C-alpha cells in the first residue's frame, strides 16, 4: 500500500517537473520594445519561439500615448551580430488594421539573432532592435 502511494507521489512529481520544464522552454514570451527616440513601441507576439526557417509573428505598433498606429511602414532586418550577416529574404509585413501588422521572417540558422526594425509614420521615423539570443537551429538528420 505504502509503495503504491510513494510511486504515485513520484509520478506526480515527475509530471510537474516535465510540465514546468516543457512550459518554460517552449512558450515564448511576448517581446516589447520602445524605439530609440521614444516615438513608437512594438510588441511582438509569437505563437512559438523563433527558430531556423519561416517564422510568423504579429506586431502591435503603438505611439507615445499608447494609441495604435495605422498606415505605418515597418521594415525588419534580421541580423546575426556574432557572424556579421543577415538573410537573403526580406521579411514580409502585412498590415491588418488597428495597429496590427503580420510579419513573416525567415532565419537561415540557429543562434543569436537581432531584428533591426525601422518604423515610419508620416514625417516621423524611428528604429529599434529586438534581441533573440537563443534561436533554435534545425536538427541535423
Ligand atoms: Cu550565422
Image (tube, rainbow, N blue to C red):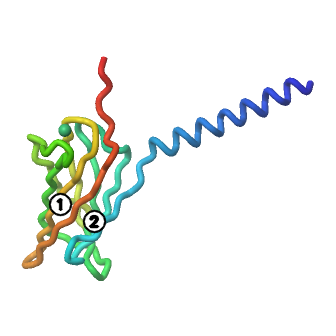
The N terminus sits in image quarter: top right
Viewer-side residue, 52 vs 85: 85
Label 2: state its secondary structure.
strand
Residue at 52% in and 43% down: 23
CA separation, marks 1 and 2? 9 Å
Q: Position of residue 32 (x, y in %)?
A: 34, 64
Label 1: state its secondary structure.
strand
Viewer-side residue, 34 vs 122: 34
Q: Quadrant of ligand 1?
A: top left
Are the two marked residues, 1 and 2, in contact with CB atoms closer than 8 angstroms? yes
Residue 113 versus residue 8 in the image, above or below: below
**Which residue in the protein does label 2 denote?**
42
The C terminus sits in image quarter: top left
Viewer-side residue, 90 vs 78: 78
Residue at 87% in and 24% down: 3
Left or right, 122 with respect to 7, comes to left
**Crowd class of label 1 (few under 14; some 14 to 19; many from 20; radius 10 Å):** some
Q: Position of residue 90 (x, y in %)?
A: 10, 47
Q: Position of residue 33 (x, y in %)?
A: 30, 66
Left or right, 68 with respect to 72, comes to right
**Which residue in the protein does label 1 denote?**
117
Amino acid at each position: 500500500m505504502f509503495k503504491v502511494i510513494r510511486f504515485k507521489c513520484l509520478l506526480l512529481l515527475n509530471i510537474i517537473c516535465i510540465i514546468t520544464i516543457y512550459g518554460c522552454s517552449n512558450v515564448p514570451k511576448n517581446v516589447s520594445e520602445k524605439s530609440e527616440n521614444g516615438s513608437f513601441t512594438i510588441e511582438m507576439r509569437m505563437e512559438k519561439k523563433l527558430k531556423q526557417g519561416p517564422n510568423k509573428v504579429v506586431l502591435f505598433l503603438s505611439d507615445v500615448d499608447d494609441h495604435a498606429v495605422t498606415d505605418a511602414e515597418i521594415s525588419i532586418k534580421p541580423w546575426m551580430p556574432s557572424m556579421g550577416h543577415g538573410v537573403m529574404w526580406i521579411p514580409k509585413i502585412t498590415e491588418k488594421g488597428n495597429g496590427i501588422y503580420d510579419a513573416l521572417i525567415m532565419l537561415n540558422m540557429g543562434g543569436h539573432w537581432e531584428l533591426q526594425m525601422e518604423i515610419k509614420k508620416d514625417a516621423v521615423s524611428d528604429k529599434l532592435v529586438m534581441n533573440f539570443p537563443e534561436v533554435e537551429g534545425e536538427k541535423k538528420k
